[in-house]
Amino acid sequence: MKRVLQLVIVAFVIVSCQKEKLTEFPPEALQEKMLSITGENITFEKILQKYEGKTIFVDMWASWCHDCLVGIPGVKEIQKNNPAVAYVFLSLDRNVTQWQKAVEKHELTGEHYYVPSGMKGTFGKAIGLNWIPRYMVVNPDGSIKLFEAIKTTDIALLEAIQ
């Protein structure tokens, strides 16, 4: 009996420590105002609506993030192999100038948005953002198909895009 109780406690601890995997974006994430590369203020909800009916690959990154920069060739390979997917880059850079220069320098193709509140702001907290790069896949209906991947080689990421 004591062994069963220990196993139940261990299972409870493991389950309660796992990060919740979102299937829908919380309202506070959807209402977060972002800045387009052309200077337009737009909510994340409006960004998603632009691609309604398409699979969306979301790349949360920053020019100061080494792992993000290392991941760029993998993102470009995914883009090459999946041209029907919409690619949305959300920058968590410290300022707009750094972000714009990095988009140009790394020749990133897709839609680009700057998240002024950064990683620890409303958007980041709403989706439990604790590491970048962070890749997400959004279904054509706007629901989240893949909540979190941190490598472009992640099998779950590659499967979610298909």
Image (cartoon, rainbow, N blue to C red):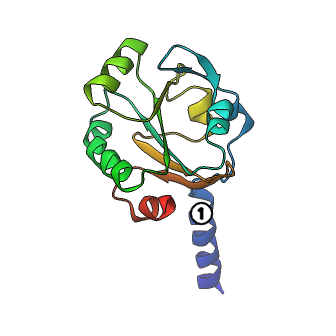
Q: Is residue 102 left or right of residue 40?
A: left
Residue sitting farthest toward the front: 84
From this view, report whether residue 137 is shown above or below residue 41: below
Residue at 69% x, 52% y is 141
Neighbours of disc 1 within 10 Å: few (<14), some (14-19), many (20+): few
Q: Position of residue 55 (x, y in %)?
A: 56, 51
Residue at 64% x, 67% y is 12
Say whether residue 8 is visible: yes
Q: Position of residue 11 (x, y in %)?
A: 60, 71
Number of labelled discs? 1
Q: Is residue 28 left or right of residue 156?
A: right
Residue sitting farthest toward the right: 27
Say whether residue 151 is visible: no
Q: Which residue is mark 1?
A: 13
Q: Amino acid at mark 1?
A: Val
Callout 1 secondary element: helix
Residue at 70% x, 28% y is 31
Q: Position of residue 7 (x, y in %)?
A: 59, 78
Q: Position of residue 122 (x, y in %)?
A: 62, 27
Residue 61 quadrant = top left
Residue 146 quadrant = bottom right
Residue at 65% x, 78% y is 5
Q: Is residue 32 left or right of residue 74?
A: right
What quarter of the picture does the N terminus occupy?
bottom right
